Image (cartoon, rainbow, N blue to C red):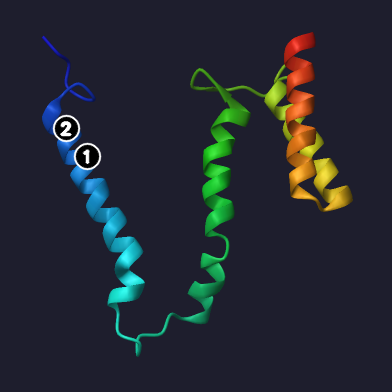
C-alpha cells in the first residue's frame, strides 16, 4: 500500500496543475491588466524587496537548521561562511567576491573540522 502524499498520483497532478496556474496568473497579471491600472507607489517600493526576501527564504533553512531543528552552534560551518561573507560584503561591497569568501570559508571549515 502506498502512503498518501508525494506518492499519490492525484496529489502530484493537483500540485503541478495548481502551481502552473498560480505561476501563470502571477506572471501574466501585469500584461493582462489595462494600462490605466496603476500600482500604488508603496506596493512598487515593497516589490523591490521581493528578490531579497525570496533569496533569504531559500538560504535561511540551510544556514540555521539541521535535520529540521534550529542549529545555532560554533560547529555550524554554514553560519561561519555567512558571517565571513557578510563582513566582506560590508567592507568591500562586492557580491561576487563575498560569495567566493563564503565558499572558501565553508570549504576550509568542512575539510578541516
Q: Tell me, yes or no, whether the two marked residues, 1 and 2, touch with CB atoms within 8 Å.
A: yes
Cα distance between the residues tagged 1 and 2: 6 Å
Query: How many numbered circles are shown?
Result: 2
Decide: is 32 above or below 73: below
Which residue is at 35% across, 90% downward? 36
Residue at mark 1: 15
Q: Residue 17 versus residue 71: which sits nearer the camera? A: 17
Quadrant of the frame with the C terminus: top right
Decide: is 77 above or below 57: above
Residue 70 quadrant: top right
Q: Which residue lies furthest to the bottom in this view?
A: 36
Q: Can residue 74 be seen in this view?
A: no
Q: Determine whether the residue tagged by mark 2 lies in a helix, strand or loop.
A: helix
Residue at mark 2: 11
Residue 81 quadrant: top right
Q: Can residue 48 be seen in this view?
A: yes
| Residue 88 spot, x, y in % from top left | 84, 42
| Residue 6 spot, x, y in % from top left | 24, 25
* Relative to 89, 1 lies left or right: left
| Residue 28 spot, x, y in % from top left | 31, 67
Amino acid at each position: 500500500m502506498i502512503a498518501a502524499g508525494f506518492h499519490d498520483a492525484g496529489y502530484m497532478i493537483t500540485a503541478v496543475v495548481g502551481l502552473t496556474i498560480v505561476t501563470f496568473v502571477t506572471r501574466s497579471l501585469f500584461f493582462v491588466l489595462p494600462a490605466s491600472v496603476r500600482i500604488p507607489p508603496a506596493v512598487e517600493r515593497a516589490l523591490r524587496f521581493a528578490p531579497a526576501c525570496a533569496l533569504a527564504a531559500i538560504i535561511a533553512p540551510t544556514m540555521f537548521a539541521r535535520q529540521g531543528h534550529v542549529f545555532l552552534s560554533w560547529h555550524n560551518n554554514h553560519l561561519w561562511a555567512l558571517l565571513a561573507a557578510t563582513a566582506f560584503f560590508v567592507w568591500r561591497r562586492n557580491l561576487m567576491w563575498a560569495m567566493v569568501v563564503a565558499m572558501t570559508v565553508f570549504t576550509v571549515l568542512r575539510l578541516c573540522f
